[in-house]
């Protein structure tokens, strides 16, 4: 347990996870959050009753940061979360995002950071979530054509108006994080970070430590690949699952990457744990190397997976085990996305 973590009480006999402060002076949140994207889209069909049960189970064990975005289901994910948010508003920290624009053309993915769009986006999210304020509001992707000071300045106005409590950025470089923080304090940086994706360590982690920004890793399980469940997306994933089109999940790349998981499985067996738990424990312990506050947000629709993921916060890997995992990211085949142009990696 690090200095900024505190133990919480128990609920129905089950230990709750520790908490950390979200950004400088922000609320304390569970050291692991919940990504809600898959409850509405991208990973095949959802049993809504089971997903709602998972939300409740998360809160029971101390998960308090719930992450959504206006793009997920084109607003449907925010609407799905609204009843849960309303029932537990004072107990949770609600995060949502703007910037990725979708239209009736399913292939269209625009990025908008202009102030007019930001003002439009926040009103729509507040309406769908049926709440008066967003606890953490992220710029989902950066449009380099819009000055960062202009975008963050517009976001800061939302704080002044009481519509947003804290600001976050996603997929920005260390230099961009510092530039934004000079305009208005940034509480959280959300970027992909896992055994398969360590680009964030190039510059963003150092900047986050320097500024007291919490890192919120998305896809800490490599979109499920690190669970060991997939060797070939074409065969192993259902229709409608967006991973069928991700480079790391297809063809020879998938088979190469599946072979990289051998040490993960070996370590999991030694601990009586799962591959997913090892992958999540690695994120928490890697953050400690930098002295970084971190709140991963693995996504799931199932109570059993939620409890499995939360248990990873209590798994401690040895120095020898961490050394076995160290080379994996350098050997991964394929990019994170088919188009990497809107990621921090492309601008570093």
Image (spheres, grey):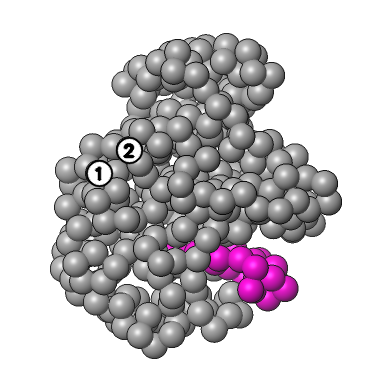
Q: Quadrant of residue 319?
A: top left
> Which residue is identified by label 2?
290
> Which percent across, then down, holds residue 7?
62, 49
- Residue 330, horizontal then vertical, whole percent: 31, 21
Q: Is residue 302 left or right of residue 214?
A: right
Magenta-highlighted residues? 77-97
Left or right: where 61 falls relative to 268? right
What is the tally of numbered marks visible in this picture?
2
Residue extending farthest to the right is 12
Magenta stretch encompasses residue 95: yes
Q: Residue at x 61, y 66 (%)?
A: 92
Crowdedness near tag 1: few (<14), some (14–19) or many (≥20) residues, C-alpha within 10 Å: some
Q: Secondary structure at mark 2?
A: helix
Q: Which mark is residue 206?
A: 1
- Write down the quadrant of residue 328 in the picture: top left
Query: Residue 163: within the magenta?
Result: no
Residue 211: which quarter of the image? Answer: bottom left
| Residue 260 tag number | none
Q: CA distance from mark 1 to mark 2?
A: 8 Å
Q: Is residue 86 above or below residue 181?
A: below
Question: Which badge, 1 or 2, is on the more N-terminal residue?
Answer: 1
């Amino acid at each position: 347990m690090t200095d900024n973590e505190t133990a919480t009480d128990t609920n129905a006999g089950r230990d709750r996870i520790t908490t950390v402060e979200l950004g400088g002076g922000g609320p304390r949140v569970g050291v692991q959050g919940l990504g809600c994207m898959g409850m509405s889209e991208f990973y095949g069909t959802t049993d809504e009753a089971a997903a709602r049960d998972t939300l409740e189970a998360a809160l029971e064990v101390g998960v308090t940061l719930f992450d959504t975005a206006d793009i997920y289901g084109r607003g449907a994910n925010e609407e799905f979360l609204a009843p849960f948010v309303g029932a537990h508003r004072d107990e949770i920290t609600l995060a949502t995002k703007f910037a990725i624009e979708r239209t009736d053309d399913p292939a269209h993915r625009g990025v908008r950071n202009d102030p007019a769009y930001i003002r439009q986006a926040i009103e729509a999210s507040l309406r769908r979530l049926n709440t008066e304020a967003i606890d953490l509001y992220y710029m989902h992707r950066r449009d380099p054509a819009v000055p960062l000071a202009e975008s963050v300045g517009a976001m800061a106005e939302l704080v002044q108006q009481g519509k947003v409590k804290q600001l976050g950025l996603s997929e920005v470089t260390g230099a961009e994080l510092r530039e934004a923080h000079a305009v208005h304090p940034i509480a959280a940086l959300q970027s992909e970070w896992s055994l398969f994706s360590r680009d964030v360590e190039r510059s963003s982690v150092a900047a986050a430590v320097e500024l007291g920004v919490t890192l919120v890793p998305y896809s800490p399980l490599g979109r499920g690949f690190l669970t060991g469940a997939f060797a070939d997306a074409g065969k192993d994933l259902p229709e409608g699952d967006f991973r069928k089109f991700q480079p790391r999940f297809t063809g020879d790349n998938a088979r190469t990457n599946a072979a990289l998981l051998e040490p993960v499985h070996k370590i999991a067996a030694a601990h009586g744990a799962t591959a997913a738990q090892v992958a999540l424990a690695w994120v928490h312990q890697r953050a400690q190397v930098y002295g970084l506050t971190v709140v991963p947000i693995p996504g799931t629709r199932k109570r059993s997976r939620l409890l499995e993921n939360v248990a990873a916060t209590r798994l401690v890997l040895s120095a020898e085990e961490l050394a076995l995992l160290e080379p994996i990211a350098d050997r991964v085949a394929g990019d994170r996305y088919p188009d990497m142009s809107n990621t921090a990696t492309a601008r570093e």
